[in-house]
């Protein structure tokens, strides 16, 4: 059943055309993702459908009685209300039903009004609404109902707005980047909720795992046209590639036809017949098609990089706390060249604090952080670019110089660099405040990379970036020769970019895990029994490390400690590899490679276990 129809909708701001007339429909049960490049008007289109904005032309026709909920990228909540008051003042239809029922109870002489109110309570499942919203708030980690909105973090505000939208039980739920500001636990809960519930969804999201698992249809806004794909994100990628290949074939044939017709036009007879006039008219159409080009330019991230010295960053027994909240407790780590570390943890465990300690933005309570002489940070923060009123895009880059150095002694102008980041000459002279959220992020990324860092820190880099730019960024980071540290809730991004994790568990506990995010989730969840075995070894069999080590020299004591860490790391790697054999899509070569890797780990583990045993015997003496 059709819920709404978008018919010939277009939008522009002054001379800037956001999108030409678009038409499509949404039916009950569809879970649709809207995909487009940054600046193509995704958020504007969502707002028009949600009745938050009006189109210049066309209209959106809704089925009678259709109720829509809209979750904006940055929710607008009243700061003076508490968490519970925000829910109760939201205008939720169920709350209105409860209010009508309470009024009907006061009018004991009006049996019909009471009966209608009673039936409405049944229909809207309103009898236990208080339990419903308290349970959902608890699942979204908003258990303190008395906390003021003004005291909430960005992630908490997003979760509160999400709870309000879900409780409305709308016919259509519209979501603009719903996973922004949510930690991975919340993203996975929301993903499971959307898969299970019978909802109609229209969303914009950069989270490709979320897209793959939740959505059953993709609408792509490309080159001003709408393309619909009835399937998952992977189906969309496959069919889109086929479509573009077909378009390129047609374009090639059209150009060849144009060349032929151009030759005819040049030698056309002076006396024009009806047939020749018709062919001239057709030529104009062929010429227009032949001159059409796909605007498929990709961000180019070729930059220079400061020379790497032998020392990057050393952290020695670093501690940091804010009152009762312990972030680091005697933390040790020596950052090496080509480290590709992901940082994960629930909101509030101190991910950004760790980054600020590394970059000398804040100081540790105790311990030392030693930085190499050639170290040069590139720090992409969640705060983003600082907008100066009246500043143009080109002026942001010119602050770093008229010419920017590249690899092999090359250099390019500020204008050329911006073109590589998909800002054409016209866009370069737009005011920065006019840019979309994704365009602002892309400009900010440009300012971070042109400073030629050799230690790159990215704090939530994927928020608001379109999928095309994300793919290019991932390719660049895979080849980045320096040290890379990433905080991200984008699981696909983390899986592709990092090879080990710092897992912040709160109160100063940090686990150094050898693998990507999917490896960690598999190890943590599906292999609980294996985890318990490793934990048992760590706490029981290896507790001898806590004993006095009088029988060992200082060098042996250090070697013994390193062995314990190495054995624990190898045990985890073994579990991760064993788990990968469960994947039914593995081919024979992949199975062989995994078997070889597993054999090498087991051999290394046996060797180190023997060494550990020798040391432990010395301890017993």
Image: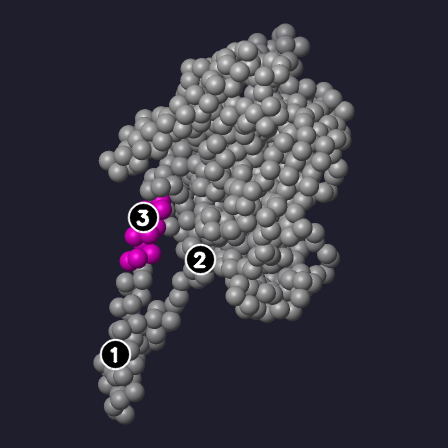
Check the image and report above or below for 612 versus 109: below
Q: Are marks 2 and 1 in contact (CB under 8 Å)?
A: no
Q: Name the quadrant containing residue 34.
A: top left
Ranked by sequence position, the earlier of labels 2 and 1 is 2
Quadrant holding the N terminus: top left
Ranked by sequence position, the earlier of labels 1 and 3 is 3
The secondary structure type at the circle numbered 2 is loop
Q: Residue at x 60, y 65 (%)?
A: 404
| Left/right of residue 119 with respect to residue 353 in the rendered view | left
Crowd around label 1: few <14 · some 14–19 · many ≥20 (10 Å) = few
Q: Position of residue 83 (x, y in %)?
A: 68, 24
Pick the residue in front: 566 or 485: 566
| Foreground label between 2 and 1 | 1
- Inter-mark Cα distance, 2 to 3: 18 Å
- Inter-mark Cα distance, 2 to 1: 29 Å
The secondary structure type at the circle numbered 1 is helix
Quadrant holding the C terminus: top right
Q: Which residue is mark 2?
A: 224
Numbered range of the magenta stretch? 236-246
Q: Which residue is mark 1?
A: 260
Q: Position of residue 389 (x, y in %)?
A: 73, 57
Q: Residue at x 59, y 28 (%)?
A: 555
Is residue 570 highlighted in magenta? no
Q: Which residue is mark 3?
A: 239
Q: Is residue 366 visible?
A: yes
| Foreground label between 2 and 3 | 3
Check the image and report above or below for 363 versus 337: above
| Left/right of residue 308 with respect to residue 401 in the rendered view | left
Q: Are marks 2 and 3 in contact (CB under 8 Å)?
A: no
């Amino acid at each position: 059943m059709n819920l709404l129809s978008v018919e010939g909708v277009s939008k522009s701001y002054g001379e800037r055309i956001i999108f030409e007339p678009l038409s499509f429909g949404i039916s009950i049960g569809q879970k649709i993702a809207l995909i487009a490049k940054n600046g193509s008007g995704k958020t504007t289109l969502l707002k028009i459908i949600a009745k938050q904005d009006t189109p210049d032309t066309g209209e959106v026709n809704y089925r009678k009685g259709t109720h829509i909920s809209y979750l904006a990228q940055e929710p607008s909540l009243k700061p003076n209300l508490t968490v519970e008051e925000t829910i109760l003042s939201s205008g939720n239809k169920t709350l209105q039903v409860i209010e009508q029922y309470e009024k009907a109870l006061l009018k004991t002489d009006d049996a019909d009004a009471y009966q209608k109110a009673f039936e409405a309570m049944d229909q809207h499942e309103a009898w236990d609404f208080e339990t419903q919203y308290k349970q959902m708030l608890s699942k979204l980690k908003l258990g303190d109902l008395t906390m003021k909105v003004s005291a909430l973090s960005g992630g908490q505000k997003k979760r509160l707005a999400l709870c309000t939208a879900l409780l409305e039980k709308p016919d259509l739920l519209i979501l603009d980047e719903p996973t922004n500001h949510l930690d991975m636990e919340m993203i996975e809960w929301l993903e499971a909720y959307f898969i299970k519930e019978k909802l109609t969804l229209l969303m914009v999201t950069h989270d490709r795992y979320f897209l793959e698992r939740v959505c059953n249809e993709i609408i792509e806004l490309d080159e001003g046209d709408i393309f619909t794909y009835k399937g998952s994100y992977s189906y969309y990628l496959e069919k889109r590639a086929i479509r573009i290949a077909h378009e390129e074939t047609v374009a090639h044939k059209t150009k060849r036809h144009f060349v032929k017709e151009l030759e005819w036009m040049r030698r056309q007879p002076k006396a024009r017949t009806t047939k020749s006039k018709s062919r001239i008219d057709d030529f104009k159409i062929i010429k227009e098609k032949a001159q059409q080009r796909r605007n498929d330019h990709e961000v180019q991230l070729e930059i220079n990089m400061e020379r790497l010295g032998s020392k990057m960053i050393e952290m020695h027994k670093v501690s940091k706390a804010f009152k009762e909240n312990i972030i680091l407790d005697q933390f040790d780590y020596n950052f090496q060249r080509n480290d590709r570390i992901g940082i994960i943890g629930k909101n509030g465990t101190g991910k950004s604090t760790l980054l600020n300690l590394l970059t000398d933005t804040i100081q540790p309570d105790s311990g030392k952080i030693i930085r190499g002489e050639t170290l040069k940070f590139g720090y992409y923060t969640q705060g983003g670019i600082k907008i100066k009123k009246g500043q143009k895009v080109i002026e942001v880059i010119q602050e770093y110089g008229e010419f920017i150095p590249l690899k092999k002694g090359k250099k390019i102008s500020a204008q050329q660099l911006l073109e590589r980041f998909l800002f054409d000459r016209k866009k370069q002279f737009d005011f920065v405040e006019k840019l979309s959220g994704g365009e602002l992020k892309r400009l900010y990324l440009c300012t971070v990379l042109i400073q030629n860092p050799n230690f790159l820190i990215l704090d939530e880099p994927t928020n608001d970036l379109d999928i095309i730019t994300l793919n290019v960024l991932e390719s660049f980071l895979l080849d980045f020769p320096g040290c890379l540290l990433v905080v991200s809730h984008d699981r696909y991004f983390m899986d592709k970019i990092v090879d080990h994790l710092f897992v912040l568990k709160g109160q100063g506990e940090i686990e150094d895990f050898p693998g990507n995010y999917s490896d960690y989730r598999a190890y943590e969840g599906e292999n609980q029994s294996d985890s318990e075995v490793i934990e048992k070894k760590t706490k029981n069999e290896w507790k001898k490390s806590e004993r006095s080590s009088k029988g060992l020299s200082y060098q042996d004591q250090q070697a013994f400690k390193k062995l314990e860490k190495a054995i624990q790391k190898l045990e985890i790697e073994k579990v991760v590899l064993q788990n990968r054999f469960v994947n039914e899509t593995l081919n024979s070569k992949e199975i062989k490679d995994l078997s070889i890797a597993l054999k090498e780990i087991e051999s290394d583990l046996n060797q180190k276990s023997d060494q550990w045993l020798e040391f432990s015997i010395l301890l017993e003496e």
